[in-house]
Amino acid sequence: SFPTRRSSDLTLRIMGAALEQAEDFGLRRFTIDDVARRVGLSRVTIYRYFPKKDQLINALIMRELRRFLTKVDKVLAMQPSPEGKLVEGVIFCLTFLRGHRLLNRLLRTEPELILPHLTTKAGNLLAAARDWIAGHIRSEIAAGKITLPDQDVDGTAELIARSVLSLVLTPDTVLPIDSLPGQRRLVELYLTPIMRSLRPTT
């Protein structure tokens, strides 16, 4: 059956309350009862939409991922050149992820829960990020804006994904990533020349 407007609204309210609960108290102490109290619904109602706590947490993570990718896509769509897409895309990713309240909460207070999924068990995450970036690279190739053998596209995409992930997870660095001008200089100095080298020779 198709979801009704009411069920969609309730799902959004539940996930909104779940995000606030996780931001305030982390995931180890996260319970359906707490979410129910925060959103003003019965526990039974929440279980109707999310039968298990893990399902609610997974839905929350997927919603945050979709929100992130939607915002990045808008940033990229505003840039006419491959260099612009790279610079503004990486800067947005660094700013968004380094400022993400839930991610930072987990890295600070429950690293044992989150770090494996971002490091030793990050294969699926990296693959998803690599595929998404590779799709944008292939679009630029198809538009004739860059030249890159198809066999090198995935590797290039993975290097970009790994660079962003590392800068997010390990904030202590001599690289100037704590200010917008510093981030811009960093990307333009180290990443833009790579993209310029991929420009078609005409």
Image (cartoon, rainbow, N blue to C red):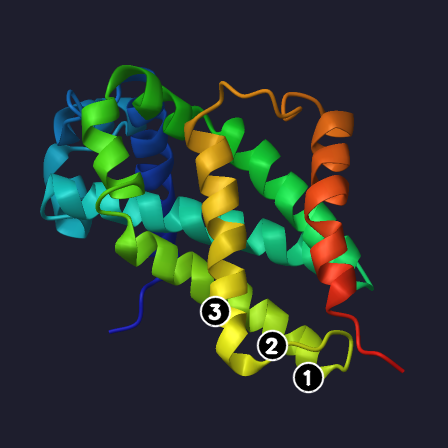
What amino acid is found at the position of numbered circle 3 in the picture? Asp
Residue of label 1: 142
Residue at (30, 24) in percent of width and height? 21
* On-image quarter of the C terminus: bottom right
Residue 130: image location, x then y, percent:
45, 61
Q: Residue 36, located in which quarter of the rendered image?
A: top left
Residue of label 2: 138
Residue at (22, 37) in percent of width and height? 116
**Which residue is at the far right?**
202
Foreground residue among 134 and 24: 134
Secondary structure of the residue carrying tag 1 is helix
Disc on res. 128:
none
Given contact means CB atoms under 8 Å apart, are the residues at marks 1 and 2 in contact? yes
Residue at (63, 26) in percent of width and height? 177
- Vertical relation: 108 (above or below) 163: above
Secondary structure of the residue carrying tag 3 is helix
What amino acid is found at the position of numbered circle 1 in the picture? Ala
Residue of label 3: 154
Foreground residue among 31 and 44: 31
* Marks 3 and 1, the one that precedes in the sequence: 1
Q: Residues within 10 Å of mark 2 (few under 14, many from 20)?
A: some
Residue 176: image location, x then y, percent:
67, 24
Q: Residue 35, located in which quarter of the rendered image?
A: top left
